Amino acid sequence: MTAAQAIVECIKREMIDNVFCVPGESYLPLLDALYDEPSIRVVSARHEGGAAFMAEGYAKASFKPGVVLATRGVGAANLSIGVHTAYQDSTPMVVFLGQVHSKFRGREGFQEVDLDQFFKPITKWTVEVKDPERMPELVSRAFRIAKSGRPGPVVVSLPEDVLPAEADMHFGPRIEVPRPAPAKSEITAFQELLNNARKPLIIAGGGVKLSQAEEGLLTFAEKYQLPVMAAFRRHDVFPNHHPLYAGHLGLGTPKQILDTVRESDLILALGTRLSEVTTQDYSLLTSKQKLIHIDIEQEVIGKVYSPNLAIIADMKEALEAVNSIKVLSSWEEWAEASNRRFLAVSSIAATEKDVINKHIISMMAEMLPINSIITNDAGNFAGWLHAFYPFKQKQTYIGPTSGAMGYGMPAAIGAKLGSPDRTVVSLSGDGGFMMTFQELETAVREKIPIIALVFNNNSYGTIRMHQEIHYPRRVIGTNLGEVSFSHLANGIGASGYTVQTVEEFKNAMNQALKLGLPTVIEILTDIEQISVSSTITSIRGTSPRK
């Protein structure tokens, strides 16, 4: 078979049923090979960045690697934002990029970029396939690396003369991902540290989600009555309505929740890299606290904080192991106090004094099926979602820890294809939504019924907030023009609504849920209410530097 056909066979063996692309002449043989494979749907996007976000959302919802295709340097550069997002989010992704003819390499050929070097800093592995007969070997290796250990993106560069070349192809056995377990001595040390703790606290991250270990975490927390916090944008790792839930560590986390972390004398960091946002600029934990850090990736452990106990293990295996330890201490009162703090600042009940943003989140919780998937863009609008929406089931939240703008709606398209039986809703600000708005046409063309909420305040609101804090009233570059997103949606065949009241939103959401079409609900908001807890007026000039 051809090298292109070998790639398709590898994708098929991974049971991947959707791939995302912007077509390009440099990989036409691969597109042609996909034409002959009915089990794989090719979703052609309007921009490579949108295609990469779709693949990333698909991977999170389906537990299969996302696959995205693009052409040479220009397509590669466009989709790099999605690759970086997958890298920081530990999302398995394999990127196939057409490359110039082998004979033209090094001559600055048309759209030539040294792709494997270009992507090296933001991928787990990059490779250029130069021998057709090695295609099954190297593509299989790409999928193995993308899925194993801490998952992430892999880039495969495909010179255009290699793809149509025929060779005898040999495919290896099905890829099984290694799942290392803790050693007995590590479990003994874990038990000793926990037994000696007065106020232990779990911080659970993406490693729990990736290994599908949510039930193990729930069992562990309940068995020993341990409070649980979610790392940045990992809300659904633990049921938010559970009496052991202690809050989310993200942007704008209330002081009461942070105080719980500061009072803890033992942090159990489970499958989290203890990122800048989770640790509040690496300032949240101190040397007075003991730290148990469990992660599948050796390089993650000790990168931010030196642990008292480091365990390199798959989270499902680790939680199964620690669920058998013998603990003498009791932490019911500590857990109850931690949960009360969370509840005191997280009530979803909206009153007349609350801005429309909170009412929208409250209405979403009331109207959406409990297993709905929520995706979001970057921006202050997400603060209301993070603070108040109750994620009650696992695998119901998909958000970029990289803070990529333009992510929410394309990721929702990918998530809907990965979980077609579930309602998928994206949340965006007007700034981020406009960056990938064109992918709404992809949803219309491909008949992918997502619901996109757009909070429109005619501003790059997050940056406006920082301007007002550090340089009050010196607003530059953050004001945006007026755009009717509902009219834009209607113009490309989607349903579009503009709402200013809660009742209008309720009617629009009812229509969206009933009709099952790609839908945009534009919510007009006031720039003055710049965040959950602040107004523009209240934050002006509050920087310590002023």
Image (cartoon, rainbow, N blue to C red):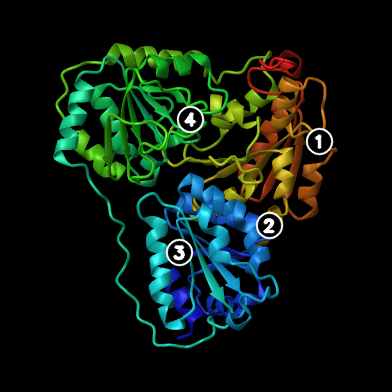
Residue 340 showing in the rendered view: yes
Side (left or right) of 244 relative to 443: left
Q: Which mark is residue 444?
A: 2
Residue 474 spot, x, y in % from top left: 82, 24
Q: Name the residue under label 1.
A: 477
**Front in this rendered view, residue 478 or 120:** 120
Name the N-terminal-most of marks 1 and 4: 4
Tell me if residue 162 comes above or below residue 383 in the rendering: below
Name which of mark 1 and mark 3 comes first in the sequence.
3
Q: Is mark 2 on a helix, strand or loop?
A: helix
Question: At 85% across and 38% down in the image, what residue appears?
Answer: 481
Which of the two discs, 4 and 2, labels the residue nearer the N terminus?
4
What's the amino acid at mark 3? Ile
CA separation, marks 1 and 2?
32 Å
Q: Mark 4 points at which residue?
A: 278
Contact, CB < 8 Å: mark 4 with mark 2?
A: no
Give me the C-alpha separation between circle 1 and circle 4. Answer: 29 Å
C-alpha gap between disc 3 and disc 4: 32 Å
Tell me the CA gap for discs 2 and 3: 22 Å
**Label 3, on which residue?**
16
Is disc 1 in contact with disc 3, using a CB cutoff of under 8 Å?
Answer: no
Q: Which amino acid does label 1 sit on?
A: Gly
Task: Say if 463 sits above or below 83 in the image.
Answer: above
The residue depicted at 36 percent of the width and 36 percent of the height is 302
Which structural element holds mark 4? loop
Q: Provide the secondary structure element on which disc 1 rests.
A: loop
User: Does dot 3 land on a helix, a strand or a loop?
Assistant: loop
Q: Quadrant of the C terminus?
A: top right
